[in-house]
Amino acid sequence: MPKPEKHVFICQQARPAGHPRGSCSERGCAEVGEAFWFQMQERNLFDRFAITNTGCFGPCGLGPNILVYPEGVMYTGVSKEDVPIIIEEHLLGGQPVERLMAPADVWS
Amino acid sequence: MPKPEKHVFICQQARPAGHPRGSCSERGCAEVGEAFWFQMQERNLFDRFAITNTGCFGPCGLGPNILVYPEGVMYTGVSKEDVPIIIEEHLLGGQPVERLMAPADVWS
């Protein structure tokens, strides 16, 4: 199997209610992850791109967070509505979605 | 925060006993993950490298599996004894550890 052209890592970290860090789970990462898995399957893109669920990347208060390698682009505050845009513009089009990129003090 | 020079993704997938796919958990990924987190902390390397726990990468029967980006090197069958070697040779030295790399039919 060739390595994927791009590999999307989707934080699915949960923490107990009231935890001071919060979590991507609390901020809706489950539906973002589901949208990615569903749309990649629907568009038959798993020959080109991989998706992996992960634990914490760090900036929990800005989540849901996603990381795309090999370029190392982090997206923060991703919603399910952003998923087709990331797939089309970044994965298929090769242009990271600027407005969703993590602030430079978080990841640059 | 600058993005890490290398990002180590460590599968921590578990499955119920007797599941036909097996899992990296069944094959010892917990102690591999612990060794990574401990040694990276001990050597004070978190300014340069990141570690993230993940779900499944696919080749469960060859685990424990690790993936290093941005180069996209997959290691299979990693033991805790391999961890300092990966840290020294690959992360610090820039030379992937050939003998641990996934077979080409799995990832190439």
Image: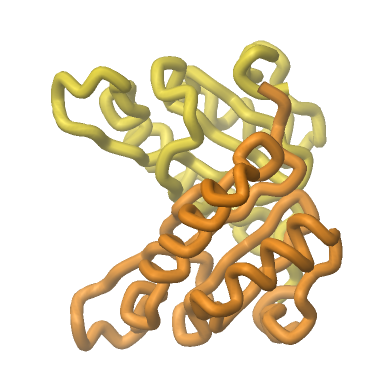
Chain colours: A orange, B yellow
* Most foreground residue, A34 or B105: A34
Single out the residue that lies furthest toward the front: A42
Q: Residue at x 60, y 37 (%)?
A: B67
* Most foreground residue, B5 or A87: A87
- Whether residue B43 is visible, yes or no, is yes
Q: On screen, B67 above or below A108?
A: above
User: In screen coordinates, is B15 left or right of A32?
Assistant: left
* Most foreground residue, A87 or A53: A87
Q: On screen, B79 above or below A78?
A: above
Residue B61 percent location from the top left of the image: 40, 16
* Most foreground residue, A85 or A6: A85
Residue B98 percent location from the top left of the image: 72, 16
Q: Residue at x 38, y 82 (%)?
A: A27
Q: Quadrant of the C terminus of chain B?
A: top right
Residue B70 percent location from the top left of the image: 76, 47
Q: On screen, A101 above or below B61?
A: below
Q: Residue at x 84, y 61 (%)?
A: A93
